[in-house]
Image (tube, helix red, strand yellow):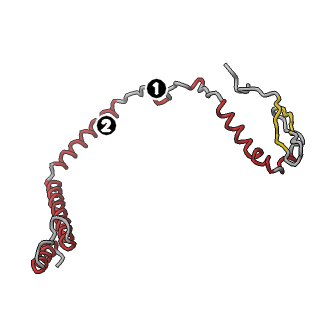
Amino acid sequence: MKTLSQPLFQISSAKFVVCENPKISHRKRIESTVEFNEKPKNLSWFASLPSCQVIHKSLPLVVSVSLLLSASPAKAGIMSGFPGLESIPGPQLPQIDFLNRINEENQKKYAEADAKFKSSPILKELLERSKLKKEKNRQEIQDKYCLRGAEWGVGDCSAEGMSPEDRENFIAMLKQKAGMK
């Protein structure tokens, strides 16, 4: 098993071509040997060269991408496959008789109160009123949409084929039904 202190790969030293100096006529390459974990020496002067600026700015990105692509997946270790504390049943609590009896009595009281409320005449009356209001509201909305369709000349209540006098009478009847006049 690998320990975390060991690196995934080792780079002891490498020779990098930093850039080419375009001002030198014989195109001499500027090379530098860089040790891993060591800061390069005397390379700050090349950052001002125009051909090196792109390389200088994109080098960290290239190194980061190469490290990401070459990295091996991490291992979860001891906790992998462990379902968690939620899956372990807790200890059985002691049962206290008088608390169990009180709980059962309360459950019976609640069930009786629910049954009594559901069968009460007040609840039945309120439910009936609610159904009637729902139907009334649905009909009012339908009448308003019918009136709008007649005025605009669209939909089931369209008055397109009627004479102007019949159309006015029809719209007046719809307005009276909708409660607008």
Question: Looking at the picture, how far across and down is residue 153, in whole percent?
Answer: 19, 71
Q: Nearer the viewer, residue 5 or 105?
A: 5
Label disc, if present, on residue 25 of the rendered structure: none
Residue projecting furthest to the front: 25
**Vertically, is 44 above or below 136?**
above
| Other-residue count near label 1 (Cα within 10 Å), few / some / many at <14 / 14–19 / ≥20 | few
Residue projecting furthest to the bottom: 165
**In terms of image quadrants, where is residue 62?**
top right
Question: Looking at the picture, how far across and down is residue 118, in whole percent?
Answer: 18, 48
Tell me: 105 left or right of 72: left
Amino acid type of disc 1?
Ile
Could you tell me which residue is drawn at 23 percent across and 41 percent down? 111
Question: Looking at the picture, how far across and down is residue 17, in whole percent?
Answer: 82, 37
Could you tell me which residue is drawn at 16 percent across and 57 percent down? 131
Q: Where is mark 1, residue-wise?
A: 88
Q: Nearer the viewer, residue 86 or 1?
A: 1
Q: Nearer the viewer, mark 1 or mark 2?
A: 1
The kind of secondary structure element at disc 1 is loop
Question: Looking at the picture, how far across and down is residue 100, in whole percent?
Answer: 32, 33
**Vertically, is 181 above or below 82?**
below
| Other-residue count near label 2 (Cα within 10 Å), few / some / many at <14 / 14–19 / ≥20 | few
Label disc, if present, on residue 103 of the rendered structure: 2
Indicate which disc, 1 or 2, sits on the residue closer to the N terminus: 1
Q: Are marks 1 and 2 in contact (CB under 8 Å)?
A: no
**In terms of image quadrants, where is residue 171?**
bottom left
**Vertically, is 156 above or below 77?**
below
